[in-house]
Amino acid sequence: MDFENKTILNNKNITLLQVKNLKVYFYLEEGILKAVDDVSFDIGRKKVLGIVGESGCGKSVTAQSILRIVPHPGRTVEGEILLHQNGNLVDLARLNPSGREIRAIRGKEIAMIFQEPMTSLSPIHTIGNQIMEAVLLHRDISQSEARELTLEMLYKVGISNPHQRIDEYSYQLSGGLRQRAMIAMALSCNPSLLIADEPTTALDVTVQAQILELMKELQREFGMSIIYITHNLGVIAEISDEVLVMYLGKAIEHANIDEIFHNPLHPYTIGLLKSIPKVGKKARTRLEAIKGIVPPPLDLPRGCRFYQRCREAKEGICNVDNPSLIEVTKGHRVSCFLYK
Amino acid sequence: MLFYVIRRLLYMIIILFLLSVVAFIIIQLPPGDYVSAYVAEMQSMRGERLAEEEIIALRKVYGVDRPMYVQYSKWLWKLSHGNFGMSLQLQRPVIDLIAERLPLTVLICILATIFTYAVGMPIGIYSAIRQYSIGDYFSTVFGFIGLAVPNFLLALILMFLFYKYFGFSIGGLFSLQYMDASWSAGKFIDMFKHLPIPVIVIGTPGAAALIRTMRGCLLDELRKQYVITARAKGLEERTLLFKYPVRVAINPIISTIGWTLPWLISGGTITSIVLGLPTTGPLLFEALLKQDMELAGSILMILSFLTVIGTFISDILLVLLDPRIRYEKSAV
Amino acid sequence: MRNQQFRKVYKAMKNNKRKISAEEKLYVATQWQLMRRKFKKHKLAILGGTTLVIFYILAIFCGFFSPQGIYKQHSGYIYAPPQRIHFFDEEGFHLRPFVYGLERKIDTITFRKIYIEDKTRKLPIYFFVRGDKYKLWNLYSTDIHFFGVKDGPIFLFGADKLGRDLFSRNLHAARISLSIGLVGVAISFILGCIIGGISGYFGGMADMVTQRVIEFLICIPTIPLWMSLSAALPKKWPPTKIYFGIVIILSIVGWCGLARVVRGKLLELREEDFVMAAKICGATSGRIITRHLLPAFLSYLIVNVTLAIPNMILGETSLSFLGLGMRAPAVSWGVLLQDAQNVRTLALHPWLLIPGLCVIITILAFNFLGDGLRDAADPYKL
């Protein structure tokens, strides 16, 4: 207990957000879906944390639970989400999800951008209206000042003719432009943390690269931390400082970017890395795929969740107990019985 | 936009023309024509027997010996000059009879529309937001009952209940002393006292249907990403709800005003007959019973045209409200 | 302690296994099985469906299920109220239900005829009794009724102004009212499929024209149109002719909605890959429509047909109620409701509204059934 408090104090200046033992469950008619099951991680100031995993592994839900916007049957059952806010510690998990405190943090301290630029903007309001709304909500400025700021933001995210675009509707913009507008909206209040939930997945590859470049640039300029969620390891390599690998609601490996790519420990991470096509690889070699499919997330069997698909699985160990996330080398944590 | 309005107006003229064809067909539908009806009546009422030459002369005078299309174009020509013909039964110009009754018909229709939307939308929004709450179940039950009880039965049941438990008859739009009186403040107030029952009866099925559509539309919208975006911005739940999903969900509802109007007028006709309101409904009914087809056809045409105008207004409203459609229409 | 936990986990696991195997069944189930399963979950739909089955059986065998003939006038029972079925009397419970005989008295204040139960006259209800002669489906002449009392009439729904049994009349009315919905929808369905099919499949000019025609027809308010058309039906026509006249009148508007549904779904399906595949294989248009497109949205059509039937029933009831549809001596719910038009009569004899109740129940049942079918037609949607 004492020890923990000390680390928090020591980390005061470098840590922005700590997630501890987070559990988010969805109470469905068919049973309890453990979307996020005992996940912990930290993120430092001005750092980029990448969260990787297949669809349905709980990475988006983790992000949503930080903002407390998990959709209806889902509930944050346990855990702490500690936000370091100029010397104060706020546990977001304790706040009322529709209360004043969390609303003051949403959009101001922590902003979020989403996967689908097509649907994440309202079809019947202008871009400007939607960005200005965020600005006016969190900053004490006038309508005209907000408009000026919005124009400036649109310019900063690389929209070439902001004076025209500000009064346009989302259907008049291309996918890339929409995502740029979303970024402008998210950064308009200068947040200390930006959560990007697969922001480039739905875009063309070339546009993807542009947006990624833009985000790196803006991070340098605004100095915010980023949680970048994706299933694309290439994107992760491009932008992250640290990586958290998730599988079926569990964090299975957490390390800095070099460690993950050069010294992966968990069989799942190893499998993921092998399944990426690489330049320079011998032609005609097959890409390795991870065998099997993700088991249905309801009523998971006992033991390691990766057991059925794991090459290294040991019967009697892996299918009996659930491995916990332990630190193997400094800053490299993994949850697998191979490393004890 | 202007181009769109003009195009819609042109379209309305075509519809009006088609409506006149339907009206003419209905006028011509009953076996025999006006002259043979007249001859038969002369015979049965007064025992007079008309000579063959007289009948032929009569046929010539009324033009019933000409081919159909000639008769139609003659009729249309008169129509375009505001001459809707004579009501044989009441011996008065059709146009006067309709003009007498039309304002009240339109008034009741507008009030019923307002009632429909004023009741249907808030309840629909409420039950979408509080899905599976007690209020939601109540509104679902109300929705089903409103859907299943036809206008005229609702009118009958209300009349029955009021008569049985309060001892008065709720039919009509005026009390006895104002029935034939000319318009005065007293008559006006008296009318407004009588209006709620017909308006409720006519509006209820529409309101019930609207609750269901509104609930469905809003539930769809609530799941959309832009709602989460707005929430992630830190907007307050209520503000968010009304600014985004409700506004988006209302658009398709407004476009259905045009749809509900024929329903309202349809329901209004039969309700007016049951409740004995001085609107076009009972006039049409009487005309049909007496085979006074000239009057009946004209009423049908006017009623249909009312719905066409209503559709036109709702289309224009929709274009003004929804930038997506505005964009499409201006592009075309 | 630890042991106990293990046991708990083990138990949970066993339960889980069973669940998963049920889930696996879900993956291999055919679409038809999935639909049935989903439909069975919809309680209201089951209720609606059962109600309709009972109503239609009663209507088909209306002669058998009615205790009295529908034209037989019981002069001593004018406006007799519904009789209550009893199982108890002063002696206690009886397995055989019975009604008390009605005694007519004159109210000393209002001088109105009133009926009171005569407790001394107990009339037990027998099943398969002989009564008024009738012809089942106009084929078999018989006098066996499902139930009845041995001496005198029985009025479960009361009697009308001529002393005719309203229960029997309601059953016979159901025959016309319920069948008109089916026949009308059948005609609308055929028209809708042909016209909507052509419009949706060929597109272009054919589509334009049919769309405009439908838009035009929809903007005419239905009841005034139906009234005008049915007023033109010759008064001298026999009931069967009037019946089909009404069906055709109702279908004139009825096909529009179904044609729209067919067209919309066809346009959606036309773009599907399997249609393209069939086209490339050289299948003819007719074959593509009947073999590939129709089955693909048959379930969808059934839903819409179910929801279209109530409108037909309502149309007939409204018209007959106004006296422009079916006319006495034919009986339909609308015809029976004509007697309820006068508030004063209605206030004294509220059982005249029972046909209205039948209409409401029928429409509700169709709507519940339609809702359940709609959910079932889309079994993969959660």
Image (cartoon, rainbow, N blue to C red):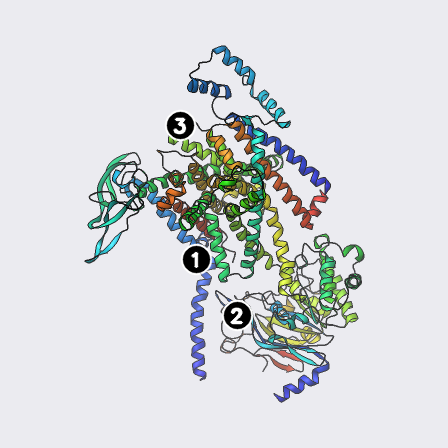
Label 3 resides on the chain identified as: C
- For the residues beneath circles 3 and 2, the answer to whether they share a chain is no
**B21 or A196, which is in the foreground?**
B21
Name of the residue lying farthest toward the bottom: A2
Label 2 resides on the chain identified as: A
Amino acid type at image mark 1? Lys
Amino acid type at image mark 2? Gln
Q: Are marks 1 and 3 in contact (CB under 8 Å)?
A: no
Q: Quickly name the residue at label 2.
A: A308
Amino acid type at image mark 3? Trp
Q: Is residue A236 above or below residue B322?
A: below
Give the position of the N terminus of chain A as an image quadrant: bottom right
The answer to whether any part of residue C119 appears in the image is yes
Q: Quickly name the residue at label 1.
A: C41
The location of residue C150, given as percent across then percent down, is 20, 44
Tally the marks.
3
Q: Are marks 1 and 2 in contact (CB under 8 Å)?
A: no
Q: Quickly name the residue at label 3.
A: C237
Q: Is residue A250 above or below residue C135?
A: below
| Residue beneath the point at 48% across and 62% down | B134
